[in-house]
Image (cartoon, grey):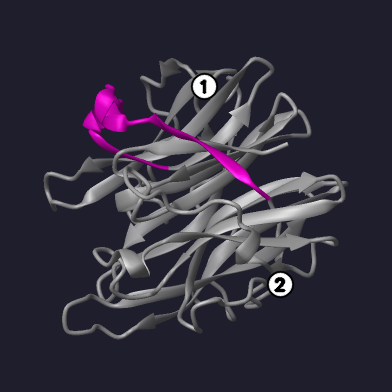
């Protein structure tokens, strides 16, 4: 795998976004049309009552040369009601066209007291070509369980044959508060399968990607594409603590492959993309998304500061 960087293609600070959002275009994920690409992302609205952020979903349409066509100007999907799993944000949203439907798998965030957050995965459908989505009920389709007690989220879904496959993250623990940091979460990549995209059977509590930097490695946002007869997964990983300001412990892009959708071999040496020497992705690379368009394979990703200033594009070398 060898990627050719095309640079940053969207900066949220240069555009008028919904709900007064001024920064962040996190976790870019696509819905591909015949002649353009719709890229959904999470942007942040500051809650004036608490000083904290609410994550909202917006999108930007690109033509086949990745010039901006338009940016969403209305609410794509609403946040949850009081006490619901997605009350305080949706980040990310993964959109899939399958079985003549456009469906979205959302990661809903709700704030906690002893720790910062809890997450679960929801489902929504669109009847207007992905401009807006209506939720499939107010609760999640995948959430914490006996072997995965915290932080189920980041669902990415593909349909191969008659089966929907979801790769997602699940928390293994919260680390106690340290001197200069709040409690830190540790999470791994798992897998679930479904016949209808609603009812899922998880490989309960089983990480499918080996750790590279120790047992407290955090793995996030898996994305999978099939090229020839091999399945390729990209994801991001980081240290569990001291990652916000220490570039050496922040997110990097990881890579794994599988020939059977069951066993995955991690192979970061062949990830084919790395930090730039300077600029917007010189300290961090995170939240990757693989997609195919016009017979080429592309990778979207965020850079420094978790996507505060947007996302960039790379194309797989033929």
Left/right of residue 301 with respect to residue 296 in the rendered view? left
Residue 17 forms part of the magenta stretch? yes
Task: Please say whether residue 107 is visible from this viewpoint.
Answer: no
Height in image: 142 above or below 209? above
- Classify residue 153 as left or right of residue 179: right
> Is 271 located above or below residue 190 in the figure?
above
Residue 66: which disc? 1
Q: Nearer the viewer, mark 2 or mark 1?
A: 1
Q: Name the residue located 57 percent from the left edge and 77 percent from the top edge.
A: 211
Q: What element carries label 1?
A: loop
Report the Cα–Cα distance between label 2 and label 1: 38 Å
Task: Classify 40 as above or below 137.
Answer: above
* Residue at 30%, 39% in the rendered image: 309
Report the residue at 56% width, 18% height from top.
Answer: 65
- Foreground: 249 or 178? 249
Residue at x-position 29% and y-position 51%? 305
- Counting the numbered discs, the total is 2
Q: Find residue 39 and report its horizontal and vertical position in percent.
A: 51, 31
Mark 2 in CB contact with mark 1 (< 8 angstroms): no
Disc 2 target residue: 203
Label 2 neighbourhood size at 10 Å, few (<14), some (14-19), many (20+)? few
- Quarter of the rendering containing residue 259: bottom right
Q: Give the range drawn in magenta.
A: 1-26
**In the image: residue 305, left or right of residue 63:** left
Question: Viewer-proximal residue, 142 or 242?
Answer: 242
């Amino acid at each position: 795998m060898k990627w050719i960087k095309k640079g940053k293609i969207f900066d949220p600070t240069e555009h008028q976004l919904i709900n007064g959002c001024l920064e962040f275009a996190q976790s870019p994920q696509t819905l591909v049309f015949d002649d353009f690409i719709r890229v959904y992302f999470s942007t942040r609205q500051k809650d004036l009552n608490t000083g904290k952020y609410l994550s909202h979903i917006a999108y930007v349409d690109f033509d086949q040369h990745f010039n901006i066509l338009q940016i969403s100007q209305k609410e794509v999907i609403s946040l949850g009601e009081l006490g619901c799993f997605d009350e305080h944000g949706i980040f990310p949203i993964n959109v899939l066209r399958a079985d003549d439907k456009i469906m979205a798998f959302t990661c809903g965030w709700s704030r906690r007291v002893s720790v910062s957050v809890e997450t679960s995965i929801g489902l929504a459908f669109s009847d207007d070509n992905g401009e807006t989505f209506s939720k499939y009920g107010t609760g999640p389709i995948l959430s914490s369980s006996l072997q995965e007690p915290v932080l189920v989220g980041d669902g990415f879904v593909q349909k191969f044959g008659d089966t929907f496959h979801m790769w997602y993250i699940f928390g293994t623990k919260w680390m106690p508060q340290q001197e200069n940091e709040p409690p830190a979460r540790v999470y791994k990549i798992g897998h679930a399968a479904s016949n209808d995209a609603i009812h899922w059977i998880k490989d309960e509590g089983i990480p499918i990607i080996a750790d590279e930097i120790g047992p407290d490695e955090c793995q996030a946002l898996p994305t999978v594409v099939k090229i020839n007869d091999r399945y390729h997964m990209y994801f991001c990983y980081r240290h569990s603590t001291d990652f916000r300001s220490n570039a050496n412990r922040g997110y990097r892009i990881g890579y794994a492959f599988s020939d059977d959708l069951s066993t995955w071999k991690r192979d970061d040496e062949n990830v084919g993309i790395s930090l730039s020497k300077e600029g917007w992705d010189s300290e961090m690379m995170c939240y990757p998304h693989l997609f195919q368009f016009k017979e080429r394979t592309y990778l979207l990703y965020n850079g420094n500061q978790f996507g505060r200033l947007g996302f960039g594009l790379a194309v797989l070398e033929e």
